[in-house]
Amino acid sequence: MPEPPTPVEIQRLKKQLLKKGAEINSKLTALLNGQQVNVEGLLGGGKPGQTPIERLRRFMAIVDASLRAIRAGTYGRCVGCGAGLPYVELEQVPWIDTCPTCAAAATTTT
Ligand SMILES: [Zn+2]
């Protein structure tokens, strides 16, 4: 079972999450003010038919959940099976909360 990230790594990931949260917030504010904002590339996999505002809000909720998990001390572990999430993957996508196995299982059931 892979080890979850170390406290030092988590601090690094937290900075990334806060930065991403600020980025989402500013785009959301701009959109709510009627400005054109390109959200492609900020979000992988938005659902078809979702407005950019919905996508940003959903993404914000995911980033927020990760920050809450850091405070709660549960960050870096799969919410499905409790396996440690590898730092190399968290570094790419710091808001993941499931291991590849559980993520694959979730996609096939929905
Ligand atoms: Zn898992």
Image (cartoon, rainbow, N blue to C red):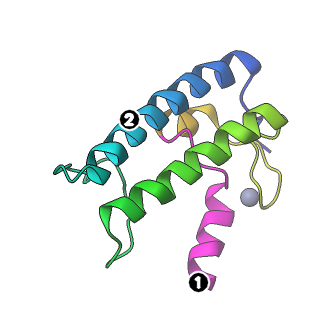
* Quadrant of the picture in which ligand 1 is shown: bottom right
Please check the rendered image and state whether residue 11 is part of the magenta-colored stretch, yes or no. Answer: no
Marked residue nearer the N-terminal end (2 or 1): 2
Q: Nearer the viewer, residue 70 or 90?
A: 70
| Visible residue check, residue 56 | yes
- Give me the disc on residue 23: 2
| Disc 2 and disc 1 in contact, CB within 8 angstroms | no
Which residue is at a point 46% across and 28% down the rendered structure image? 19
Quarter of the figure with residue 27? top left
Which residue is at a point 35% across and 37% down the rendered structure image? 26
Identify the image quadrant of the C terminus. bottom right
The percent position of residue 101, horizontal first and vertical second, equals 66, 63
In the displayed structure, 55 sits above or below 17; it is: below
Residues rendered magenta in the picture: 93-110
In the displayed structure, 49 sits above or below 101; it is: below
The percent position of residue 2, horizontal first and vertical second, equals 75, 40
Q: Nearer the viewer, residue 59 or 89?
A: 59
User: Label 1: which residue?
Assistant: 110
Q: Nearer the viewer, residue 64 or 75?
A: 64
- Give me the disc on residue 96: none
Which residue is at a point 41% across and 64% down the rendered structure image? 54
Q: Amino acid at mark 2?
A: Glu
